[in-house]
Image (cartoon, rainbow, N blue to C red):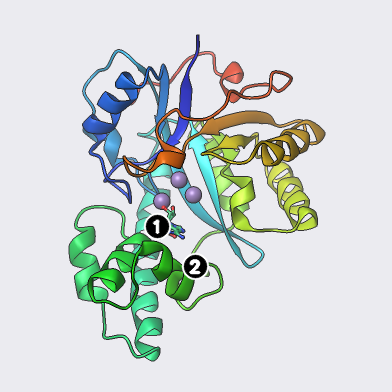
Amino acid sequence: MLRPDLHTHTNRSDGALSPCALVERALDKGITHLAITDHDTISAYRELPPSELSIVPGIELSTRWMKTGIHVVGLNLDVNHPLLRQGIETQQQARVERARQIAARLQKLGIPDLLAEVTQIAGTSTIGRPHFARVLVRHGHSKDMAAAFRKYLGNGKAGDVRQVWPSITDIIRLITEAGGTPVLAHPAGYKLTATKLRELVRDFCDAGGEAIEVVSGSQRPEVTKKLAALAKDHDLSASCGSDFHHPGNRWSDLGQFPALPADLTPVWEQWNTIKPFA
Ligand code: AMP
Ligand code: MN
Ligand code: MN
Ligand code: MN
């Protein structure tokens, strides 16, 4: 039986495990098809040895739609495509610029300049808000990561800087040019009203989007039902993934989610081959 997990992270972005350790864990969990979808980087693919499980080359790209930060996963793409490489370079520069802006905004709230420390703990990984969260916790400004997001970094807070991101249309074009399938990531995760979510999905389709994550992490069954209906209404295929970041996070371990509803077209049905990444 097919056991896919098409949305996961390594320590090349904000996950805890190295690319090799993630693949080991996926094998342990009986996963047959694994996509590593780090934020705005494909560097995990440079470190992977050949494996007995099918590895689908992927990425999770940050975009902007209206005033919301939206994530688009690109699956089964050519990781060596020059336009993708260029796009990733631009995203990385945007992240560095965004980190500078986040630090400056936090300073206005009376927090000392965190940029140097955040840059240091991010090291060669994609720099992002989770690194700010860790430093905010380390210095006692928040009791844990969730609290740091609630007060400083989450939706609409000072550290939620999204104007640096390209439009959803540009990112979908980039994924398509690199031979990949554009997938709207965790559609229920943006806290949009039903009307706004429908608008987002329509714009995503108009821009050439092909699939949505109908099953993401451990979402409630009624949410899955709504997303399945959205997929059907818009003739989109369906993807599924844990959005795994850390072991010990019960609600989003690798491969721990229900199967896609049987009446949907799984995203992998449109792939004749899985692209090589080496
Ligand atoms: P960024 O890619 O820098 O915009 O950061 C977004 C990432 O922060 C997400 O991919 C999650 O991994 C993480 N994140 C978002 N919200 C929370 C939260 N409330 N608590 C902990 N981590 C979060
Ligand atoms: Mn993340
Ligand atoms: Mn995401
Ligand atoms: Mn993710």
13 over 232 or under it: above or below? below
Residue located at (33% from left, 51% from top):
14
Q: Is 176 on the left-hand or right-hand side of 32?
A: right
Q: Quadrant of residue 264?
A: top right
Q: Is 196 on the left-hand or right-hand side of 114?
A: right
- The local secondary structure at tag 2 comes to loop
State whether label 2 is within 8 Å of ligand 1: yes
Which of label 2 and label 1 is nearer to you?
A: 2
Q: Nearer the viewer, residue 196 or 202?
A: 196
**Which residue matches tag 2?**
154
Q: Position of residue 59 (x, y in %)?
A: 43, 40
Disc 2 to disc 1, C-alpha distance: 23 Å
Q: Disc 2 residue type?
A: Gly
Q: Earlier in the sequence, mark 2 or mark 1?
A: 1
**Which residue matches tag 1?**
90
Residue located at (47% from left, 30% from top):
6
Number of numbered discs on residues: 2
3 over 180 or under it: above or below? above
- The local secondary structure at tag 1 comes to helix
Residue located at (33% from left, 70% from top):
143
Q: Quadrant of residue 98?
A: bottom left
Specify the quarter for ligand 4: top left
Q: Quadrant of residue 262?
A: top right
